[in-house]
Structure formats: C-alpha cells, structure tokens
C-alpha cells in the first residue's frame, strides 16, 4: 500500500511540476546606447523575439545586440553549439580589426549594423513627413472652406445691396434693417479674411518645414545607399585579403568551423528595404527656357491647356495674368475672394483666388492648386509657377544646364 502511495506522489509531482521560467536579463545594444529588461522567447533567421516585463513582445535584429547577448542568444538557439562560443575572444578581436564579426557560421561586416540602424531613422523621418503632409491637407481643406464662405457672403452682399436700392426714401425702418444686415455681413467677411491670412501664413510655415524634412529624407536615403555600396565594395576587397584568409584557416583549425564571407541574409533583407525606400523617391530633370534673367517651363493646366510659366519660388502662389486665365477658361467669378498683391517694384495690385483642378509639369501633377488671377490693371504681368505648386516638391534650378530638377516623395 505504501509503495502504491509513493508511486502516486511521484506521478502527481511530475504532472504539476512548474516549467522552468526563462530568466529576465538586461539586454544591451552593441554600442551600449540602448538597454531593455526582457526574457528570451525565440530566434527566427536574424530576428530575435523578446518579452518585456510588462508583457509586450518585441523583435530585434541579431546584429544590434552586444557580443555577450549574441553568445547567450546563440546558446539558446542551438544549446551547447554556439558558433560565437567556439570562436575565442582573441580570434574574434582579430576578425574585428578587419571590420568583421562571426554570426551563425558566417562572417558579417560590422558596417551592416549601421545600415540596420539607418532604417529606424528613416521610419522616424517618414513619419514626420506624413504628419506634415496631413497638416497641409487639413489646412488646404480649411482654405477651401474659407473661400466658399467668402463666396457666399459676397453673393449675399450683392443681394442685400440690390434690395437696398429698391427701397423708397420714406421706408426708413426697412432701409436701416438692410444697412445693418450689410454691415454685419461685411464684418463676417473681414473676420474670415483675417483668419484666411493667418491660415496662409501658417501654411507657408508648414510648407517650409516640409521642404526641410523632405530634404532630410532624401539625404538619408542617399546616405543609406552610400553605406550599402561601401559594404559591398569592402566585402569584395576582403574576399581576396590574405589576412582574412589566414584568420579563416586559423578558425577552422581551432573550431572546425568552415567560415565564409558572403552576403548575409540580414544584408539581403536590408538591400530589399533600401530598394523599397528608393522607390518612394520620384525625380525628373525638366528642360527650361531662358528669358533674360528668368527661366520658364511648360505647364499643363487642367489636363487641357499648356503654357509657359516663369519658375518663381519667391511667389507664394501660382499667378495667372487675366488674359491667360480667360484664354483657358480660368477667369474668376465675381464672388471669388479678392486679395491684394505687392509686386517686386512695390506696386500693389488686386487679384482673385481660384482653384485649378490640376497643374502638371513633366510627369508631376498636383490637384486642386490655389492660383491668383491678376486683374486687368496688370496687362503686362507674366504667368508665375509659384509655391502652391512648387512647394509639393524638392526643386533645384540648374542655371548652367537650364534645367529644373524636381523630386517628390511618394505618398503612403
């Protein structure tokens, strides 16, 4: 009977034995700039899965970890057979002097970690770009709403004035009521004009910020390409390096490992990510016509009409003289918002705001572009390709080659 009870107890203990818990440890990056408290979950390819103390699961590239962490990870992925453990510290230091590290039976270049970190920065810059682009879209939607409100108030102003003209001189009460309505309506118009001007200033500020962030994104992409090219070039050089060959032979004698220098899986994935990044950058060099000290470019309006416009990054908006707007059916309506413009010589002229359905230069098209149509008091004005179009791109005018370089980052 005692023997039976003892057997039952053994079975009970086996069935209810608590599984071994993975230890919580402090993981750190190769340069020591980042640490996290977490337990090891698994490794698949080059991606290491960790579980933080709050239960959140994260995935980190193996190349990011410190040497000590990589040794631990490799021992977990293949207990007792860690590649890094077999390579002693002295031998690893010799590889490191050549800019090489041992990873999963492969020799990887240390510069590959710089490439991996670069994509994290690219994601941050891309997020900033998206935020700024969304801010501009919201501002432009509000701009359209203001224009519609001004148009309706302008129509109402005309109707009230027409009604006032019909009132006889003896109907003082009615006269005063309409005059009061006209004054109240015009006060609303002035308020919206003020808000419209503030919106325009804010929009100009955001466009400048977007231009800087766009340039950061483009430069970052170029830097990543340079890093990738340098890695590929150095790998080819090392393939025939006698010092590396001697180290590989030494490692084989000591450990039996047949190490090889080749493009790692991690680098192949990075190259694919880099191509995806580069595919978001669209560019074109467009020929210009020189006209004295200015340069003009062929511009298509609303998909129907093409005209020459002076490229002018100093102009806040696309500007059309009255004759051009009339010729292409873009003349403003009486109720379109009126604005005052200051010319380069200090003269002030009147204009009206309209929205062109589309404007295209080369292969780049922008829809719903705010334009200013000048009045008939500026008969000699030129059509200007201003910032309501150019602000959507990174543009560079090459005077020597008479060309306009336009670069756009594709929307996500």
Image (cartoon, helix red, strand yellow):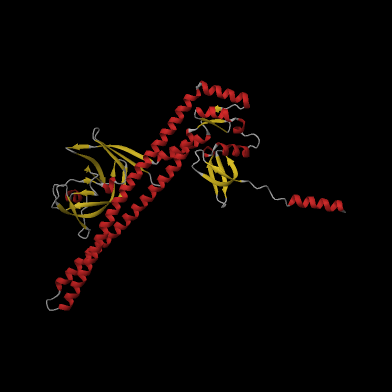
Total numbered circles: 0
The x, y position of residue 360, in whole percent, is: 29, 44
353 left or right, relative to 129: left
Residue at horizontal 47 percent and vertical 25 percent from the top: 236
Q: Is residue 48 above or below residue 237?
A: below
Q: Name which quarter of the figure residue 42 lies in.
A: top right
320 left or right, relative to 247: left
Q: In this rendering, does residue 106 appear at all?
A: yes
Q: In this rendering, does residue 302 appear at all?
A: no
The x, y position of residue 396, in whole percent, is: 28, 39
Q: Is residue 169 above or below residue 230?
A: below
Tell which of 123 and 146 is nearer to you: 123
Tell which of 308 and 48 is nearer to you: 48
Residue sitting at the far right: 1
Tell which of 224 and 293 is nearer to you: 224
Q: Is residue 179 above or below residue 249?
A: below
Residue sitting at the far top: 242
Residue at horizontal 17 percent and vertical 68 percent from the top: 161
Residue sitting at the far left: 169
The x, y position of residue 136, in whole percent, is: 33, 52
Q: Is residue 393 above or below residue 157?
A: above
Residue at horizontal 78 percent and vertical 50 percent from the top: 11
Q: Name which quarter of the figure residue 71 lies in.
A: top right
The x, y position of residue 215, in whole percent, is: 34, 42
Work out which quarter of the rendered image holds the N terminus and state it: bottom right
Residue at horizontal 41 percent and vertical 34 percent from the top: 225
């Amino acid at each position: 009977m005692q023997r039976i009870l003892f057997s039952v107890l053994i079975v009970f203990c086996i069935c209810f034995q608590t599984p071994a818990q993975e230890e919580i440890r402090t993981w750190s990056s190769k340069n020591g700039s980042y640490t996290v408290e977490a337990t090891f979950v698994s490794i698949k390819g080059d991606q290491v899965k960790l579980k933080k103390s709050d239960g959140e699961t994260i995935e980190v590239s193996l190349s990011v970890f410190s040497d000590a962490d990589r040794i631990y990870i490799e021992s977990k992925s293949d207990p007792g057979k860690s590649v890094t453990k077999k390579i002693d510290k002295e031998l690893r230091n010799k590889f490191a002097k050549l800019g090489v590290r041992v990873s999963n039976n492969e020799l990887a270049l240390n510069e590959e970690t710089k490439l991996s970190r670069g994509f994290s920065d690219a994601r941050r810059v891309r997020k900033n770009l998206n935020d700024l682009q969304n801010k501009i879209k919201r501002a432009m939607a509000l701009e359209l709403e203001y224009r519609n409100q001004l148009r309706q108030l302008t129509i109402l102003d005309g109707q009230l004035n027409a009604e006032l003209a019909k009132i006889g001189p003896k109907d003082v009460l009615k006269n005063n009521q309409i005059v009061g309505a006209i004054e109240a309506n015009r006060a609303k118009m002035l308020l919206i004009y003020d808000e419209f001007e503030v919106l325009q200033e804010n929009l100009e500020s955001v466009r400048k910020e977007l231009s800087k962030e766009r340039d950061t994104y483009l430069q970052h992409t170029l830097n990543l390409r340079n890093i990738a090219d340098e890695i590929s070039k150095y790998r080819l050089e090392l393939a025939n390096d006698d010092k590396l060959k001697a180290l590989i032979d030494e490692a084989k004698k000591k450990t039996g490992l047949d190490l090889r220098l080749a493009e790692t899986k991690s680098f192949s994935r990075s190259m694919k990510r880099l191509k995806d990044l580069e595919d978001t950058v669209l560019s074109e060099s467009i020929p210009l016509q020189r006209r004295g000290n200015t340069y003009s470019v062929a511009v298509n309006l609303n998909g129907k009409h093409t005209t020459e416009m002076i490229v002018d990054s100093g102009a806040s908006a696309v500007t059309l003289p009255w004759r051009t707007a009339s010729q292409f059916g873009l003349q403003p309506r009486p109720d379109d918002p009126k604005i005052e413009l200051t010319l380069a010589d200090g003269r002030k002229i009147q204009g009206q705001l309209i929205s062109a359905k589309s404007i295209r230069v080369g292969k780049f098209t922008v829809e719903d572009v705010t334009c200013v149509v000048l009045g008939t008091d500026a008969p000699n004005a030129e059509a200007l390709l201003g910032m309501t179009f150019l602000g959507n791109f990174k543009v560079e005018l090459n005077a020597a080659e008479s060309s306009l370089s336009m670069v756009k980052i594709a929307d996500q």
